[in-house]
Image (cartoon, rainbow, N blue to C red):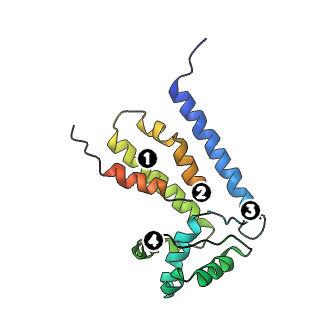
Amino acid sequence: MRKVPLETLAGVWIFVATVALVVEFAGYFEAGLTNGRGYPLGQDFINMWAGAKLTALGRTEEIFDFGAFHAFHLSVVGASIQLYHYSYPPVMAVLSLPLAALPYVPAPVVWLVGSTALFAFAARCALPWPRAVLFALATPALFISLIAGQNGALTAALLGGGLDRTN
């Protein structure tokens, strides 16, 4: 039996994960900007974007008012979604302000592509061997973070960017 090179398996996983992400995101236009089952496009990302947008609008206090925050979410997605709360420190609303300049529909795409690019860059800097980025992008945890619209790729990029590469 011939072994399949790890690079090939990583490339296949990245391709399959990318197709799965596109299919998943395409399903978020079923009811407004939701999948019709209570989840908005970008899932957890809506919190970060809404916090930035409300801050840009001078309505920062609404971020920590569950009712007002949920009402803002509903006004964005145009359909019923589950209750989301702002689980970031207040400074995150300021740090994520550039996202508020974008309409909601392209914002999660920009966020996910940008944070993944930073993750790939940090992986390349931290692990300068040729296949480091390929294997980093093939990490299933990255797929889970992206499909849920979370900040895992950015967090990993920041942590990876702090690694000592002098040895």
Location of mark 3 (residue): 35
Of 67 and 102, which appears nearest the observer? 67
Q: Earlier in the sequence, mark 1 or mark 4?
A: 4
Q: Position of residue 164 (x, y in %)?
A: 25, 45
Check disc 1: other Cα within 10 Å, few if <14, some if 14-19, many if 20+.
Answer: many
Give the amino acid type for the residue marked by disc 3 in the picture: Asn
Of 83 and 39, which appears nearest the observer? 83
Spatial CA span between label 4 and label 3: 25 Å
Q: Position of residue 15 (x, y in %)?
A: 61, 39
Q: Earlier in the sequence, mark 3 or mark 1?
A: 3
For mark 4, give the secondary structure: loop
Spatial CA span between label 3 and label 1: 29 Å
Q: Which mark is residue 147?
A: none
Which mark lies nearer to you, 4 or 3?
3
Check disc 4: other Cα within 10 Å, few if <14, some if 14-19, many if 20+.
Answer: some
Location of mark 1 (residue): 120
- State the image quarter where residue 89 is shown: bottom left
